[in-house]
């Protein structure tokens, strides 16, 4: 499927969403619509696997909505063994009645049992399809909600209408693996645009995601050598809908590399479910990712709480877009937490450095971390200044990138990207001021492809450019600027004032005066010929 077709599919589905959600909140409707897309994907994937395994035995539909319904009826004694085989092949099972083809047909026929069948389908996928990957996946989808209608029939009718429209929109496009994944991503972005500040809970704009992904997939010790051939692991501890992790995966795969396993953590249950769906929709097998539902700052993921340093998990690449200046309540015990002990605790008023230190703690020695933060972390005093000083003294802050304002749906403030490494070669910090390189939009500003490439290339080759980028020694940062990383201290975007030569100005004025006298004399000659009064010299 071409990029144009992907965009067209996304626009068609968004038009359906915009048309059908009525008075329903956009966030609520998002969860219904994306769940139906996910069911369509699971069904397509499952039926393709079934067809491959059954080969010539795969039947014609023969009056059934899906061929599998026919096969199940004809081969009742073989169903259990067949499902065991499919569990090994695609890691899950869906009963024929719950496949998208049957659900869509019930919707077209306005079947009164559609709502009940959907409820059974979601419950089956969550509890019986296979393992923990699907547990609670549809927990936030309430098919009995009055938002769908006050009475059962009204809810059933609305579901019939929504599913029929989605089925019609999807029927015009192929069912290739990434088609629905790309449509899913597009819809997440569109719903984010309508969610205002709430969008920050689940979505990092693709343009910014592209920058972080490109940075962490370059060789950490020598970015000039290009992309890494393999990332064993990538981690996002505030992963939202998972788009940032998927961008890292896409970045390294498009460069001919490979990735081991994807790890994410998300506190919001709805967003956690979006992330798991997003992974599967993009063809990431359940064995290739692990998304944990829990609180990052309290570190309630048992896998990360390994006390033995030799067994502590660590990651090749870490990316994150955590909540900006999030208020938190650190306990006294957290002061002894291995993540914070060497640096101190971030203030209650802003957990920005707490998130940063959490991720940095799990970064491999040769790894790269890129995190989006508000500019305050660059210059605020108190506890944040102490953390910043130690990170700088230990040589862990590699690059500071200032981005334009109004790039996010959740805030209009300009933000920065900090690139951190545990082992970095240059004894300086690269500052990039990209704040004036963007295209102004109606609601949000946009980074153009050239703007993105300029940032990435400048980082990769550590290039210096007047009024854009500069390498600053640790000595200058410490002694001249007292560990303040405010980008404007090191790079000014204003053009230098033109130096005026008084001698040149005097000469220009002298020449102008001579021209005036010459013109006046000539004019008076004309007046004299006409017998008129002469102008005074």
Image (cartoon, rainbow, N blue to C red):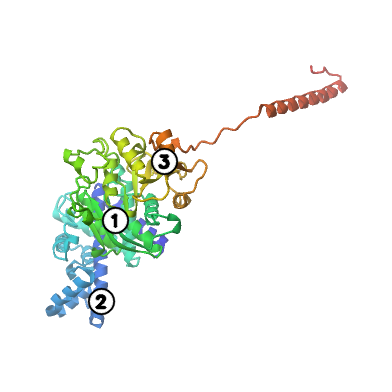
Element carrying mark 3: helix
Task: Give neighbour class at mark 1: few <14, some 14-19, many 20+ (Cα, 10 Å).
Answer: many
Q: Quadrant of residue 119?
A: bottom left
Reading the image, the residue beneath label 3 is 474
Q: Which mark is residue 51?
A: 2
Give the camera-side residue of 389 and 212: 389
Residue positioned 40% across, 40% down in the render: 405
Q: Is residue 62 left or right of residue 479?
A: left
In which quadrant is the N terminus drawn? bottom left
| Mark 3 → mark 1, Cα distance in angstroms | 27 Å
Q: Is residue 474 above or below residue 524?
A: below
Q: Quadrant of residue 154?
A: bottom left
Residue 429 coordinates in the image, percent (x, y): 42, 44
| Mark 2 → mark 3, Cα distance in angstroms | 62 Å
Residue 496 coordinates in the image, percent (x, y): 55, 35
Q: Is residue 406 visible?
A: yes
N-term-proximal mark, 2 vs 1: 2
Furthest residue in direction bottom, as rendered: 56
Element carrying mark 2: helix
Residue 56 coordinates in the image, percent (x, y): 25, 83
Residue positioned 75% across, 24% down in the render: 513
Number of marks in the rendered image: 3
């Amino acid at each position: 499927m071409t990029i144009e077709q992907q965009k067209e599919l996304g626009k068609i589905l968004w038009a359906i969403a915009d048309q059908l959600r009525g008075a329903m909140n956009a966030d609520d409707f998002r969860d219904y619509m994306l769940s139906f897309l996910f069911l369509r994907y699971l069904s397509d994937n499952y039926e393709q696997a079934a067809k491959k395994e059954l080969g010539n035995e795969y039947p014609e539909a023969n009056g059934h909505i899906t061929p599998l319904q026919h096969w199940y009826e004809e081969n009742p004694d073989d169903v259990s063994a067949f499902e065991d085989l499919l569990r090994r092949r695609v890691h899950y099972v869906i009963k024929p009645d719950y496949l998208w083809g049957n659900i869509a047909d019930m919707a077209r026929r306005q079947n009164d049992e559609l709502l009940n069948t959907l409820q059974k389908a979601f419950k089956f996928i969550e509890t019986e399809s296979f393992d923990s990957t699907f547990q609670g996946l549809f927990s936030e989808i309430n098919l009995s909600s009055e938002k769908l209608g006050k009475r059962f029939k009204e809810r059933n009718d609305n579901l019939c209408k929504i599913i029929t429209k989605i089925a019609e929109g999807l029927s015009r496009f192929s069912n290739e693996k990434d088609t629905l994944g790309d449509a899913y991503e597009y819809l997440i972005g569109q719903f984010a645009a309508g969610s205002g500040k709430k969008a920050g809970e689940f979505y990092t704009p693709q343009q910014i995601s592209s920058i972080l992904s490109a940075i962490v997939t370059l060789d950490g010790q020598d970015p000039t050598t290009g992309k890494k051939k393999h990332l064993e692991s990538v981690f996002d501890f505030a992963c939202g809908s998972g788009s940032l992790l998927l961008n890292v995966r896409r970045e390294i795969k498009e460069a001919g590399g490979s990735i081991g396993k994807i790890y994410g953590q998300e506190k919001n249950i709805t967003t956690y479910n979006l992330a798991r769906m997003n992974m599967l929709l993009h063809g990431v097998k359940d064995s290739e990712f692990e998304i944990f539902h829990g609180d990052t700052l309290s570190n309630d993921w048992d896998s990360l709480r390994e006390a033995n340093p030799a067994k502590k998990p660590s990651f090749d690449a870490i990316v994150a877009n955590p909540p900006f200046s999030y208020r938190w309540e650190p306990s006294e015990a957290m002061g002894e937490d291995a993540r914070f002990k060497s640096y101190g605790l971030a203030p209650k008023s802003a957990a920005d450095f707490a998130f940063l230190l959490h991720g940095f703690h799990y970064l491999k020695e040769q790894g790269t971390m890129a995190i989006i933060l508000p500019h305050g972390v660059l210059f605020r005093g108190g506890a944040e200044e102490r953390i910043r000083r130690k990170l700088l003294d230990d040589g862990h802050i590699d690059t500071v990138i200032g981005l334009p304002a109004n790039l996010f749906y959740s805030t209009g403030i300009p933000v920065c990207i900090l690139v951190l490494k545990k082992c970095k070669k240059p004894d300086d910090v690269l500052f990039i001021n990209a704040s004036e390189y963007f295209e102004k939009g109606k609601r949000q500003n946009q980074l153009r492809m050239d703007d993105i490439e300029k940032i990435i290339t400048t980082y990769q080759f550590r290039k210096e450019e007047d009024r854009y980028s500069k390498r600053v020694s640790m000595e200058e940062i410490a002694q001249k600027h007292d560990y303040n990383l405010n980008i404007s201290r090191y790079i000014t975007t204003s053009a230098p004032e033109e130096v005026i030569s008084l001698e040149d100005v005097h000469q220009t004025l002298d020449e102008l005066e001579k021209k005036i006298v010459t013109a006046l004399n000539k004019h008076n000659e004309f007046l004299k010929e006409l017998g008129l009064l002469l102008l005074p010299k």
